[in-house]
Amino acid sequence: MITINKLFLIGIVVFLGCSKEQTSEPTKNLAGNYISNSFSEPNSVDGMVDVQSSGGSVQMTLTENNTYSATVNIPQSVSTVQGSGITTYSGVYSLANDTITMNPAAFSVTRMKWIEGSYSLESISPARGGTFFILQRK
């Protein structure tokens, strides 16, 4: 006859095994290389500048083990608050529901929205006139 302790132990093992599978799957779907198809940045006056149409870009790699690396390219011809040039970032990220939080921030963006069906990421600007980009998986 199976004792209550054995049933309890089996229940814990099954619960932990299932919960681990459920939390790892979204990260697998999210992992990949992304490149911007829209990138705007505040300029030195009052407004936004379309960095993407001037030859700028954002590229980001998200891994299954929750690390990220990003490269931001702002051409010399574009005047933004952040300045111009190529800047690289790296760190860790976490995923909760459809929100990715990056630590440290990548190019003044700390949170991004994951749109799973379209395999895209959209920056969530902390304030009006903040950096905005949409990244599409390559």
Image (tube, rainbow, N blue to C red):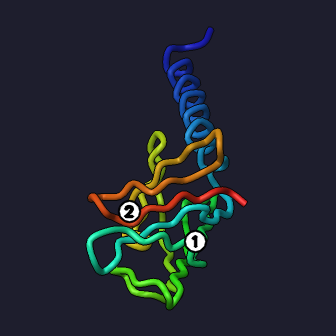
The x, y position of residue 114, in whole percent, is 53, 47
Residue nearest the viewer, comparing 105 with 117:
117
Residue nearest the viewer, comparing 73 with 64:
73
Report whether residue 104 is seen: no
Q: What residue type is labelled 1?
A: Ser
Residue that numbered label 2 is attached to: 110
Residue that numbered label 1 is attached to: 53
Residue located farthest toward the right when viewing the structure as drawn: 138
Helix, strand or loop at disc 2? strand
Residue that appears at 59% across and 68% down? 60
**Are the residues flagged by discs 2 and 1 in contact, CB closer than 8 Å?**
no
Helix, strand or loop at disc 1? helix
Q: Which amino acid does label 2 sit on?
A: Thr
Residue that appears at 49% across and 78% down? 89
Residue 123 image label: none
Estimate how packed mark 1 is, as few (under 14), some (14 to 19) or many (20 or more) residues with alpha carbons within 10 Å.
few
Q: Is residue 73 above or below residue 121?
A: below
Estimate how packed mark 2 is, as few (under 14), some (14 to 19) or many (20 or more) residues with alpha carbons within 10 Å.
some
Between marks 2 and 1 in the image, the one whose residue lies nearer the viewer: 1
Residue that appears at 60% across and 31% down? 18
Residue nearest the viewer, comparing 123 with 105:
123
